[in-house]
Amino acid sequence: MIKKKGEYGYRKYFKIKNGIMIGFFIIVILVLFIASKHTKENMSRILLVSSILMVLPMANLLSPFLVVFKYRSCEYDLVKPYLEDKHFLFDIILTMKEQVMPLDIIYIDGEKIFSVLSNKADKRKTEDFIKERMKLGGISVNVKVCESINELKKFIKASQNEENNKLNEIRAILKSLSV
């Protein structure tokens, strides 16, 4: 089953999909390299250069794979009640030079964004990063990052669950920032 960014289980799907593609690249590179050792001189050089050039697209797949590899989705039982709600995004991983920010759950209520950060990244930097990127998209939002699902549940209960015409824009920006 194909998962899209923002859906629960996307991290696992991403790891499996990219792992298969990286494995395919490794096999092709090895076949080209071994074939270059068992062919004539001119063809050998072409195969060797081809195997070297195959490393570049593999590296483009490998770098986000390595970022996502150590993070898992949060427990299914915790997110099950929210799966069909369009105000939620799941398994979003934002990256910047200083840190990786795996946001397990993001709740969008009007122009407020609440999220659960699953590692010990700096919450303040994460909030500022999201605000800055939303501002670039022309949307002014308030962002609150917390460390537990219980804190998020408090925000959900206190929210008005406003219908927001910018909901889809906010979702699109967050998805575009994710690995």
Image (cartoon, rainbow, N blue to C red):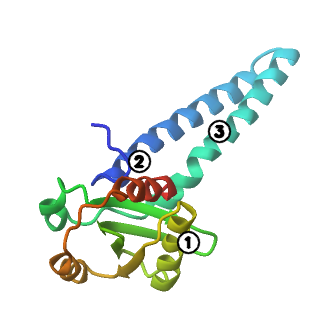
Label 2 crowding class (10 Å Cα cut-off): few <14, some 14-19, many 20+?
Answer: many
Q: Of helix, strand and loop, which one carries label 1?
A: helix
Q: Are marks 2 and 3 in contact (CB under 8 Å)?
A: no
Local secondary structure at mark 2 = helix
Residue 57: assigned label: 3
Query: Disc 2 vs disc 1: which is toward the camera?
Result: 1
Q: Earlier in the sequence, mark 3 or mark 1?
A: 3
Q: Which residue is mark 2?
A: 14
Quadrant for residue 174, please give it. bottom left
The answer to which of 11 and 124 lies nearer the viewer is: 124
Q: Which residue is mark 1?
A: 132
| Alpha carbon separation for disc pair 2 and 1 | 26 Å
Q: For mark 3, give the secondary structure.
A: helix
- Marks 2 and 3, the one that precedes in the sequence: 2
Vertical relation: 128 (above or below) 169 = below
- Per the rendering, the mark at residue 109 is none
Q: In this orientation, does residue 100 appear? A: no
Front residue (pair 108, 89): 108
Eye-nearest disc, 3 or 1:
1
Q: Residue at x 45, y 62 (%)?
A: 93
